Image: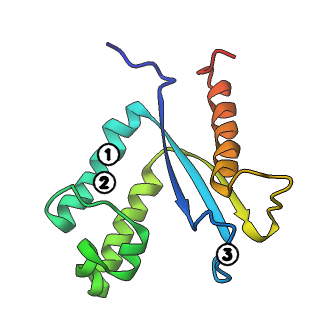
Amino acid sequence: MAEADSSYIFYADESGDHSLTSIDVNFPVFALSLCGFKKSSYCRQIVPRFQRIKFHYFGHDAVILHEHEIRKQKGDFKLFTDQRLRESFLQDVSDCIEASSFRIAGCVILKSELKLDFFPDNPYAIALGVCLVKVYQFLKAKHCCPV
């Protein structure tokens, strides 16, 4: 079966926590991003590129690329205490991202400015709503939505 050009997949990731009761003064924001890929390029180009990087550095492709673990050289990323190896890995990941075609819908909320009387939902729900509107507008422009 041929794949339609309008088939997209989206992944979400957040940074920070969505608590409004204990706001970290060093990171007082909550951020959410949805990253969208055309399925055909995701399957044929992007996934194989990342798999090659994972096999090259780890010998398998089961490792999950978490920024915090990479930056702190924790878990699978302990091998990156070697600065040359870490720089090579980061360059390979950067090159892979640069060569990839994708869209990002994002929202950043300064939690201290969020007034609960106007926004009864938590920052995650608010950010998700904003991002989903952006995704909907993108898909509608690509004629992927019925309305």
Q: Indicate whether 140 appears above or below 1.
A: below
SS for dot 1: helix
**Amino acid type at image mark 1:** Val
Q: Nearer the viewer, mark 1 or mark 3?
A: 3
Seen in the image, is 3 located left or right of residue 54? right
Proximity of marks 1 and 3: CB atoms separated by less than 8 Å = no
Quadrant position of the N terminus in the picture: top left
Seen in the image, is 92 located left or right of residue 53? right
Residue positioned 77% across, 71% down in the render: 112
Local crowd size for mark 1, using a 10 Å CA cut-off: few (<14), some (14–19), many (≥20): few
Proximity of marks 2 and 3: CB atoms separated by less than 8 Å = no
**Amino acid type at image mark 2:** Phe
Distance Cα–Cα, label 1 vs label 3: 36 Å
Distance Cα–Cα, label 1 vs label 2: 5 Å
Judging by the rendered image, the residue that carries numbered circle 2 is: 50
Seen in the image, is 35 located left or right of residue 140? left
Judging by the rendered image, the residue that carries numbered circle 1 is: 47
Residue positioned 37% across, 71% down in the render: 90
- Extreme-bottom residue of the structure: 82
Local crowd size for mark 3, using a 10 Å CA cut-off: few (<14), some (14–19), many (≥20): some
Residue positioned 45% across, 18% down in the render: 4
**Amino acid type at image mark 3:** Ile
Question: Toward which corner of the image does residue 29 lie, by quadrant?
Answer: bottom right
Q: Nearer the viewer, residue 19 or 143?
A: 19
Q: Where's residue 42, x and y in %? A: 38, 39
Question: Toward which corner of the image does residue 2 lie, by quadrant?
Answer: top left
Judging by the rendered image, the residue that carries numbered circle 3 is: 23
Distance Cα–Cα, label 2 vs label 3: 35 Å
SS for dot 2: helix
Q: Nearer the viewer, residue 90 or 105?
A: 105
